[in-house]
Image: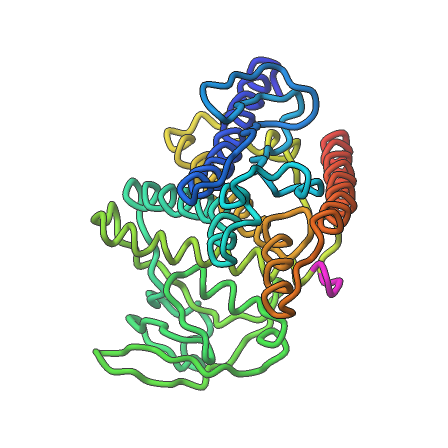
Amino acid sequence: MGSVNLLFSILITVVALGIMVCLHELGHMIVAKCFGVLVNEFSIGMGPKLFSFKPGETTYSLRLLPLGGYVQMDGENEDAEETQTADTGRTFRGLKPWKRFVVLAAGATINIILGLLMFAVINKCTYVQLPVVTEITEGYEESSVFLTGDEILKIGGTRIHTFQDLTMELAEPDVQTADKLDVTVRRDGKKLVLSAPLYPTESGKKLMLVFGDIVRSPGIFTSLRYACYDTVYVVKAVVRAVGDLIVGRQSMDSLSGPVEIVSVVDDMASTGSPYTWLNLLSLFALITVNLGVFNLLPIPGLDGGQILFLLIEKISGKEIKPKLIGMINAIFFALLALLAVYVTFSDIMGLVK
């Protein structure tokens, strides 16, 4: 990697991730303020404060370490009993449960919507690929139950909207252990359910079909519709990847951090392709949706963890002490920081090798 290109790639990555984090925290703050919560600080980054300003009741800060950010709402931390204002309606914990849920989910929602809009721009400027059979792989014409022009609608009971949906479903472990699949197709305007054989290859079992039908530069509504499908695909991919990590189908080495992102950005920027900016936009669309979904995981220290505490309180009818929540959050935040260090170290070692 050239030093100039590398600096450019680092700058792009830092700015892009900074925008994602800023919008995430902005989502929390705007909704909190709409509900009347006193927001004490809006911070981008962690660690020592580089500079700050306070135009009103909220302090806006930029901190040294470009690792996330936070919105500090009155009555949210472990010392909430001591920091509450006289008007308890201005504290986060003074909100009704559904309002707290909306505040907590707002950041991730903004990230996912941002990714959806990015996908819409990409689709509008390029094309969308449909799950329509354009060819039977050579040598499999006689044994295949498909015909050219078949539009795949379902694999088993799973709805298929795009070519990506199809590839994800075929990669499922239970599909890969099967010999046949029930595939619903639209043929000449009619729906048919086919019992389709799977053929073993070096990269797993496949239907041995070629999908090439695309819609180039689709209209805005088609672009948005397929952007929704793209976003759902990424959400499902993240959830399945987390499940694979939990059950051991994937190792921790499959995780990537900012160092790997810079490396990928540098590779893209070095190609000189006229579509470089679209490739970068696609990468950052994936990352922002990943960020949104990851933050909603029910892990203390993340937004999803706070939603989990909220659900526990709602179901049990008992309030969890803020100090206990703060202590649990601190422990898991430290574990997440260790994970970030491990992923960063792995990324660096991967580049060295």
Q: Image quadrant for the N terminus?
A: top right
Residue located 56% across and 22% down the image: 61
- Percent across and percent down for residue 73 are 56, 38
Task: Please give left or right for residue 46 compared with residue 35 in the image.
Answer: right
Residue at the limit of the structure toward the front, as seen here: 86
Of 53 and 335, nearer the camera is 53
Of 84 and 126, nearer the camera is 84
Q: Is residue 267 visible?
A: no
Residue located 54% across and 28% down the image: 13
Of 144 and 64, nearer the camera is 64
Task: Please give left or right for residue 233 compared with residue 176 in the image.
Answer: left
Say if 305 sits above or below 191 in the image.
Answer: above
Q: Image quadrant for the C terminus?
A: top right
Task: Please give left or right for residue 153 compared with residue 53 in the image.
Answer: left
The main secondary structure of the magenta stretch is: helix
Looking at the picture, the colour scheme in use is: rainbow
Residue 240 counted in the magenta span: no
Q: Is residue 60 visible?
A: yes
Say if 58 sits above or below 132 in the image.
Answer: above
- Quadrant in the picture for residue 251: bottom right
- Percent across and percent down for residue 87 are 51, 41
The image shows a total of numbered marks equal to 0
- Percent across and percent down for residue 82 are 68, 38
- Percent across and percent down for residue 25 are 51, 37
**What are the residue bounds of the magenta stretch?**
245-249
Residue located 51% across and 55% down the image: 101
